Image (cartoon, rainbow, N blue to C red):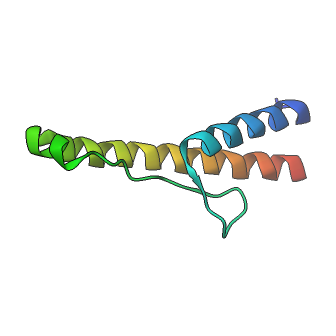
Amino acid sequence: MSKSREELLARKHEILAFLAKHYQKDPSKLENFTTKYPDFSESDIATDPSSEANEVAEYETSLEIEHALEQELAEIEAALEA
């Protein structure tokens, strides 16, 4: 069963709102966003060596979410054009 046009548009707007709130818009591509690298302070890293590992893990997770949502947007766009 395919989703209705209204459901697809609603989901598209949800994804775009989430991406706009949590990611930086890529001005060179329509509906493309870039993941911000978390900025843990040097004092956090100095007092807790695992902070640097947490920073990398947070970035990787955020990047995966961004790519999954962008893929879903592409699929929605394809469905809306069909």
Task: Choose between 66 and 42: the one closer to the eye.
Answer: 42
- Asked if residue 8 lies left or right of residue 21, the reply is right
Does residue 39 sit above or below 34 in this rendering? above
Q: Quadrant of residue 22?
A: top right
Residue projecting furthest to the bottom: 28
Where does the N terminus fall, quadrant-wise? top right
- Asked if residue 60 lies left or right of residue 75, the reply is left
Image label count: 0
Can residue 5 be seen by looking at this rendering?
yes
Name the spot of residue 48 as percent of width and height, x first: 11, 38
Name the spot of residue 71 as percent of width and height, x first: 63, 50
Q: Please name the residue shown 83% across and 30% down the image.
A: 7
Name the spot of residue 21 as percent of width and height, x first: 60, 40
- Asked if residue 30 lies left or right of residue 51, the reply is right
Can residue 2 be seen by looking at this rendering?
no
Q: Please name the residue shown 10% across and 45% down the image.
A: 46
Name the spot of residue 23 as percent of width and height, x first: 55, 48
Does residue 72 sit above or below 5 in this rendering? below
Q: Please name the residue shown 44% across and 44% down the image.
A: 62
Task: Choose between 80 and 41: the one closer to the eye.
Answer: 41
Q: Quadrant of residue 57?
A: top left
Does residue 47 sit above or below 23 in this rendering? above
